[in-house]
């Protein structure tokens, strides 16, 4: 196996006395799409900026193709292409001029014409940057990240602010980039994006790697990796639910019950329903999504109500109780609840896979 | 928070001299440097500059337009005893020459550079083999060149339309011009360094703009100022530049004191700009 193209060891970066990145370690293998996933303010961008050589680590080591991004900055920029979060181009620079300009920065640039064609920018070549749509801007940034024929590209929050169609188009482009042999380091806070694209994911929370695994591996770790939802003909009693094995959470909304557990939970539930002659209308059994695993692995900004033995159904909002036994969570967190994946969860549970 | 690679370079943009854009790239990119990169950056920035009608007007046209307007006033074309026998229009040629530099260096350039930082354009460039100093160098070179072009236009129109004699000590005049441009760009660099946003840069630029215009003699040529005021103004970069240009125009080598004031201001402003400039 070839050596990892990116290695990050014990990376630590402190701002104003607060460790934004606090001992992050991971390695990106050649040819994979490696995700860095985490809530806002978790230290994802700071981590990849150390990889890009835009920031100097306080502690720890970063290597890109064996090079130090700070000391060997010029060489690293020839190996690594970057799309930065919230960076722009000169507003009146046209797409063609931007491509020509950035091509001139490299000794062996890719031909920008086929690149522009691949990214669907051919009919926008004479359009100024300021006139491009969000998706077009991001496609241009992908082109600029690839124009130096890099071995690895870092894409930071690439699809933030794009509409669903543009986002899906961009995902396809990222897969094409990987298929062309370029390793991708993808920073995101979208679960769906990480689950769909990444070969492996480092979940970063509060400056630390909370977990590092394949998307399936992360989901499997989640206490409630199987989601069962149905509308019982007769309400189940709390005691019935409490007796179910491996149940990690149970929520009820408008008579519809959603249980997170394992296969053992499903078996026991079916037996229970048969015994009480309860019909389960619209029964769905689905695998949990990365959302569930993510919420298990990261801390939330609101205190989680602790499930009680007697009333597991009392909890109406779905935080899987997987880590409830670890005790109360500090209510303070930098992470913005509006970007938390919670609002998308009910949809995952209800829909058949 | 500075870009590490860039912070090491932080002294180089102004230190390499505002008038030498091609030499701007810092030490980090030394190995296998792309020869065309700095040229490509300059080419792009020149194109972008040409798409800014406001800057084009104020830098290239306005100083000469002002000269033509003032020269059209009959009394400006009469010899004045308190100016040593020259006409006001003669005294205003160096003033409009300096005005073009102040427009370019202090008004036009700082919002561009600050905007580039604000929009992350300098940062994006830090992630390529080219140092963002190349953009700063290109900006300074191009605004410097535009100021000099505008200055030559003023001289030519003054000569052709109002019979203002061309400078007699050409070489001394050129030295004074280059030093004046350098101090204008250094002042602009400091404004860019101290302003967080391009709006702030415009505001700070305007605040600096009026004293600089005054010292250059836009309202009252330095020769016509009372002695005490003239002494104060001559300690300022554009007051010194005005005197140096006048001396060279009348055939003398510019006084070392005036050139010294310009060099000193350029050095101090450049050092301050390099000290406080941030890449993000």
Image (tube, coloured by chain):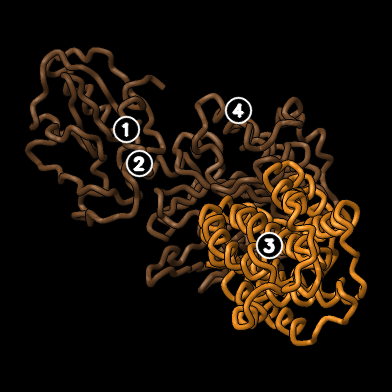
Chain colours: A brown, B orange
Q: CA distance from mark 4 to mark 1?
A: 23 Å
- Crowd band around label 1 with a 10 angstrom C-alpha radius: few (<14), some (14–19), many (20+): few
Distance from disc 1 to disc 3, alpha carbons, whole Å, reads 55 Å
Q: Horizontal placement of B253 versus B211: left or right?
A: right
Q: Disc 2 versus disc 1: distance between alpha carbons?
A: 7 Å
Q: Which residue is mark 4?
A: A169
Residue closer to the observer: B176 or B127: B176
The residue positioned farthest toward the bottom in the image shown: B257
Determine which residue is flagged by label 1: A343
Quick one: label 4 or label 2, which is nearer the N terminus?
4
SS assignment at label 3: helix
Q: Residues within 10 Å of mark 2 (few under 14, many from 20)?
A: many
Q: Residue at x 50, y 26 (%)?
A: A164
Quarter-wise, where is residue A287 in the image? top left
In the structure shown, which secondary structural element does the residue marked by tag 1 occupy?
helix
Name the residue tied to disc 3.
Answer: B102
Q: Residues within 10 Å of mark 3 (few under 14, many from 20)?
A: many
Q: What is the chain letter for disc 1?
A: A
Q: Marks 2 and 4: in contact by CB < 8 Å?
A: no
Residue B211 shows up from this direction: yes
Q: Which residue is mark 2?
A: A340
Considering depth in this image, is A104 or A30 the residue closer to the camera?
Answer: A104
Q: Secondary structure at mark 4?
A: helix
Element carrying mark 2: loop
Give residue A289's position: percent from left, percent from top. 40, 34
Q: Chain ID for label 3? A: B
């Amino acid at each position: 196996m070839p050596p990892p193209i990116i290695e990050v060891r014990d990376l630590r970066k402190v701002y104003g006395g607060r460790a934004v990145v606090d001992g992050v370690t991971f390695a990106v293998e050649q040819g994979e799409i490696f995700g860095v996933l985490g809530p806002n303010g978790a230290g994802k961008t700071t981590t990849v900026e150390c990889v890009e050589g835009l920031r100097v680590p306080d502690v720890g080591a970063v290597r890109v193709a064996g090079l130090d991004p700070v000391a060997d900055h010029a060489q690293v920029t020839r190996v690594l292409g970057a799309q930065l979060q919230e960076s722009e181009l000169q507003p009146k620079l046209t797409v063609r001029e931007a491509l020509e300009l950035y091509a001139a920065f490299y000794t062996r640039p890719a031909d920008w014409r086929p690149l522009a064609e691949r990214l669907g920018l051919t009919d926008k070549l004479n359009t100024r940057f300021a006139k491009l749509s969000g998706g077009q801007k991001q496609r241009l940034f992908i082109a600029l990240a690839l124009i130096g024929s890099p071995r690895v590209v870092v894409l930071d929050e690439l699809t933030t602010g794009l509409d669903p169609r543009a986002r899906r188009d961009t995902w396809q482009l990222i897969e094409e980039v990987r298929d062309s042999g370029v390793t991708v380091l993808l920073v995101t806070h979208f679960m769906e994006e990480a689950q769909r694209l990444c070969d492996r994911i480092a979940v970063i929370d509060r400056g630390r790697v909370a977990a590092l695994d394949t998307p399936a591996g992360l989901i499997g770790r989640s206490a409630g990796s199987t989601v069962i939802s149905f509308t019982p003909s007769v309400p189940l009693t709390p005691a019935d639910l409490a007796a179910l094995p491996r149940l990690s959470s149970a929520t009820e909304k408008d008579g519809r019950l959603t249980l997170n557990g394992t296969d053992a939970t499903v078996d026991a539930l079916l037996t229970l329903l048969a015994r009480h002659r309860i019909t389960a209308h619209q029964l769905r059994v689905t695998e949990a999504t990365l959302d569930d695993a993510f919420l298990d692995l990261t801390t939330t900004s609101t205190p989680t109500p602790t499930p009680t033995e007697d009333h597991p159904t009392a909890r109406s909002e779905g935080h899987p109780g997987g880590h409830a036994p670890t005790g109360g969570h500090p209510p303070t967190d930098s992470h913005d609840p509006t970007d938390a994946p919670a609002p998308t969860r009910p949809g995952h549970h209800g829909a058949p896979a | 928070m500075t870009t590490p690679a860039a912070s090491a370079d932080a002294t180089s943009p102004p230190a390499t001299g505002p008038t030498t854009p091609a030499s701007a790239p810092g030490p980090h990119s030394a190995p296998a440097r792309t020869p065309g990169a700095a040229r490509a950056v300059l080419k792009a920035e020149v194109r972008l500059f040409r798409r800014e009608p406001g800057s084009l007007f104020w830098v290239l046209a306005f100083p000469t337009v002002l000269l033509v307007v003032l020269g059209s006033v009959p009394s400006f074309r009469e010899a004045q005893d308190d100016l040593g026998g020259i006409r006001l229009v003669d005294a205003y040629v160096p003033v409009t020459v300096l005005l073009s530099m102040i427009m370019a260096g202090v008004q036009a350039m700082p919002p561009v550079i600050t905007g580039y930082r604000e929009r992350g354009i300098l940062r994006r460039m830090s992630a390529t083999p080219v140092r963002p100093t190349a953009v700063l160098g290109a900006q300074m070179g191009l605004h410097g060149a535009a100021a000099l072009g505008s200055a030559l236009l003023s001289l030519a129109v003054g000569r052709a339309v109002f019979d203002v004699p061309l400078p007699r000590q050409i070489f001394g005049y050129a030295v004074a011009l280059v030093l004046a441009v350098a101090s204008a760009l250094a002042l602009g660099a400091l404004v860019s360094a101290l302003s967080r946003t391009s709006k702030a840069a415009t505001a700070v630029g305007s605040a600096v703009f009026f004293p600089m215009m005054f010292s250059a003699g836009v309202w009252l040529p330095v020769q016509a100022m009372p002695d005490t005021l003239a002494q104060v103004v001559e300690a300022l970069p554009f007051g010194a530049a005005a005197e140096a240009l006048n001396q060279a125009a009348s055939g003398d080598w510019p006084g070392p004191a005036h050139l010294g004031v310009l060099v000193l201001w350029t050095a101090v402003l450049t050092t301050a700009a390099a000290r406080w400039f941030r890449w993000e």
